[in-house]
Image (cartoon, helix red, strand yellow):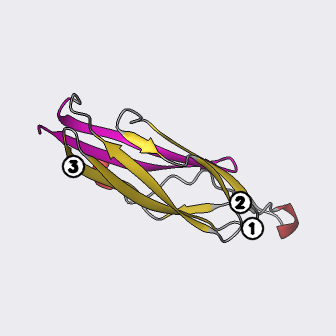
Amino acid sequence: CWTCCGGVSTGGSSSGGGSSDNTILSTKGFKIFQNFLSASLKQGEAKRVRFSIENDGKEKMDFNITTTLSEIIVIRENKFSLDAGERKMIALEFLSFTNTKPDLYLGKIFVTAGGIKKEILVSVEIQYA
């Protein structure tokens, strides 16, 4: 739902009773500091958009970034690693070619690491030149 995009999926949760000896604490986790990206382009234009990711876990993590709008969004660095506590700025290129059909394109960017998958909602409006 586009009107309720304040949260980002973070995976499952743990529950149960018993002593702390039965509890498994995850040492993996990361934050995305943007949950919605939007751009408006004319045919033939390009814009750079950025967001940041922080490894707030306790171990090094390997990241992979993909998108459902690969015909419009270019991810310059889609695979990388972050040490625990490290933060990285990710640059995306939103591209509209002269023959790109003017329309509103809705999609997602997926960030995956350590078995955790999070998403960023994307809206790209392409207008006539």
Compared with 31, 46 (above or below) is above
Name the disc covering residue 28, or none.
2
- Whichever of labels 2 and 1 marks the residue nearer the N terminus, that label is 2
Q: Secondary structure at mark 3?
A: strand
- Whichever of labels 3 and 1 marks the residue nearer the N terminus, that label is 3
Residue at 50% x, 45% y: name it: 110
When asked about the image quadrant of residue 45, the answer is: top left
Q: Secondary structure at mark 1?
A: loop
Q: Nearer the viewer, residue 43 or 10?
A: 43
Q: Nearer the viewer, residue 65 or 21?
A: 65
- Majority secondary structure of magenta residues: strand
Where is mark 3, residue-wise?
40
Where is mark 1, residue-wise?
58
Task: Tell which residue pokes out farthest to the bottom in this image.
Answer: 85
Compared with 59, 104 (above or below) is above
Q: Is the Cβ of the residue at disc 2 closer than 8 Å to that at disc 1? A: yes
The local crowd at label 3, few if under 14, some if 14 to 19, many if 20 or more residues have their Cα within 10 Å, is: some
**In screen coordinates, is 98 left or right of 24?**
left
Amino acid type, residue under disc 1 in the picture:
Lys
Task: Say whether residue 17 is visible.
Answer: yes
> Residue 2 at x, y = what percent?
30, 48
**CA gap, disc 2 and disc 3:** 35 Å
Count of numbered badges drawn on the protein: 3
Residue at 19% x, 34% y: name it: 103
Residue range in magenta is 101-129
Residue at 29% x, 52% y: name it: 38
**CA gap, disc 2 and disc 1:** 6 Å
When asked about the image quadrant of residue 37, the answer is: bottom left
